[in-house]
Amino acid sequence: MSAAVQTRPVAVARPGKRVLPPIKITGRSTPLTTIGQSVLSALESLASNKLRSFLTMLGIIIGVGAVIVVIAIGQGASAAVSDQLSRLGTNMLTIEPGSANVGGVATGTGGRPTLTDADVRAMQQASPHIVAISPLVGGRDQVIAQGHNWNTRIQGVFPDYQIIQNYTTSSGAFFTQADETNWASVALIGQTVANNVFPGADPIGQEIRIRNVVFQVAGVLSVKGNNGFQDQDDIVLIPFSTATRRLYGKATIGQVQVQVDQPQNINGVIAAITQTLEQTHHIRPGRPDDFQVRNLQQLLDTRQQASSTLTLLLAAVAGVSLLVGGIGIMNIMLVSVTERTREIGIRMAIGARARDVLLQFLVEAVTLAAVGGILGILIGIAGTLGIGHFAGWRTLIAPLSVLLAFGFAALIGIFFGYYPARKASRLDPIEALRYE
Amino acid sequence: MERTESRLPNREIGQSNGIVYRDGAVEERPRTFKGEPIIRVEALTKEYRMGSNVVRALRGVDLEVQAGEFAAVMGPSGSGKSTFMNLVGCLDRPNGGQYWLDGLLVSSLDRDELAAIRNRKIGFIFQGFNLLARASALGNVMLPMLYAGLNARDRRERGLQALEAVGLADRAQHKPSELSGGQQQRVAIARSLVNDPAIILADEPTGNLDSRTSVEVMAVLQGLNDQGITIILVTHEADIASYCGRNVTFKDGKVVRDTLLPQPRRAAEVLLTMPVIGEAEEVVA
């Protein structure tokens, strides 16, 4: 074949001054130089189609935002439980009326008011390790004083309740055993109640009215704050005897709280109380108890577990929305690759290698995800603060959750951006150049 | 795979490897390596599968293009000239035959190596300009240097030099949509120049332009060729081909005619005889 090669002289132009000097290149383009350019071109392309970019990012924005808010609420609740735990200590028991069996039908916990004054007195004698004991009785009622009124929790308790719950007073004093014995009409009010019923005034010695019974305010409780479930300062404490005899007419004990001297005596006290109550309630051996003795530690553990399970569940739902956001990115990147087929052809013709094109589209997808992630973080933090402010829930933004959500968003960008980018990089330059 | 070392064997000097310049001078030792042409193809074949049919687009093409030539590739559609240009432009690989570009055997390179060759050895000019709409003129011109790995300062400097070479230094920041067709094509020419390629391939560069702008573009290309740049231009217009020093005609996948034009028309001179549309009154005033 080489015989057919034309080897004849042709008229050519003399070499003159070069148009451009010879190119001096130290090496082929590195991924870094192209990444820099790709980020710029990605931001340009995002800016050139703002609405579309925003809608594409929305999935990621909502996903990241939701993850941050949910985890912040979960962390807040769990921190509140921990606080409660550390404040109360672990050597506390609660006794609650249990399920009564009425003609073969179990009524469930608290189904029947089975705890009485007598039970409480019996329990007091049950073990020498009981430091303090208090029944709780109460409900929600309107508190009225001089043109102001407020709906709050009313609780009738023994003076011992101060020890059990670590109550202190910011002014005045807790009621005494004498008050309990004499059915005294004295009350301790929480700061929230004080603020609402006696705005700007000193409540000590003032009178409040609950259900036509007049009480004298003996003290204001120190602020305890929100425990993640309720405002602990929105409360009125009155002597148990006053509550049962004068206010509500009869005792319906919702709960008895017991403080044990040492944690190692808890199990002994539980056994003693159980035995005592089984005697007073005439429960035959082998029959189910109609009361429940619970360790507070267990109660809080259960609560903690429930709250973290819920957090995990909600975070998973939020994570699914991140995934959906990723699919949105993939969709729009596929559209973009098709729209820009010609551009890809041009880039290939002038020397872009497959991996240059791959990198460019991958960077665009990750930029979409990352910008969405940053917006999501801002919205998540704003949402968390908003919820904390308006709903009054305790929230805790964990930096790790923010980082995790953002990293996950970026990973989603890489994962869902890879396929479209690969598709772009595999285009045939001739076909791509011809694409209209 | 061996990359850059696949050079041609040294052929005997004297046969016909001397270079004849347009002014009649003859030089025994041409500029390129050991007297090799910029482009040399031997028995090049290319087939396409269109459904069950096999289209034999190229049926054995032999051709050499010397450094400094300005060759027009002509032929009707379906003659194989576009396929030939795609192969010469390293956008596609042949089914058979061999192709040396600037002394380098490129017919056996893989995709990424071909991309590197396109980047460094070839400058493309297209019928539809094929500029990136979002980038400025300078941005477009700088793009090949990005893939070559130049740093930002060198890219900018060379980009501006290239734009100056095509007379568009004052339009560097304009987007393609803000430029006329002729100006866009000159940006494309600047882009084809920036990496100091061995050859410029122009595929119907005047196809989208009116006749005066076409001649203007040919004047730019002739000016570059006068400075020693090798150009291959695909056209189906005999008028455009008459500005090139060599006309190669394809038909049915083969070269059927290969003629030299000792005195091609000078586009710059033709321009003087053409009326300036729209600007005539201004000139009078």
Image: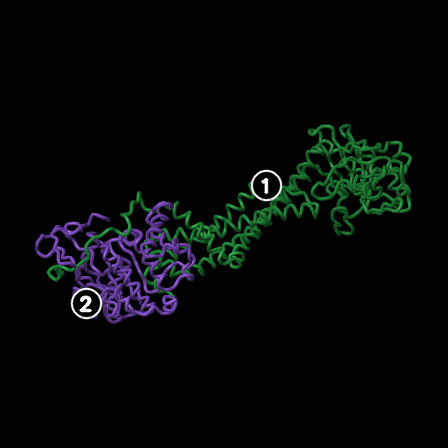
Chain colours: A green, B purple
Report the residue marked by disc 2: B254
* Amino acid residing under circle 1: Ala
Marks 1,2: beta carbons within 8 A: no
Instruction: Give the secondary structure at mark 1.
Output: loop
In this rendering, position of residue A285 left or right of residue B227 = right
Chain designation of label 2: B
1 or 2: mark nearer the eye? 2
In this rendering, position of residue B234 left or right of residue A58 = left
In this rendering, position of residue A167 left or right of residue B186 = right
Instruction: Give the secondary structure at mark 2.
Output: strand
Q: Residue at x 47, y 59 (%)?
A: A332
Query: Image quadrant of residue B226?
Result: bottom left
- Return the x and y of residue B245 as percentages of the image width and height: 20, 63
* Amino acid residing under circle 2: Lys
Front residue of this view, candidates B183 and A144: B183
Label for residue A398? 1
- Return the x and y of residue A426 as percentages of the image width and height: 35, 57
Q: Residues within 10 Å of mark 2 (few under 14, many from 20)?
A: many
Placement of B249 over or under A240, stated as above or below: below
Front residue of this view, candidates B29 and A167: B29
- Return the x and y of residue A155 as percentages of the image width and height: 82, 41
- Return the x and y of residue B219 as percentages of the image width and height: 28, 62
Chain designation of label 1: A
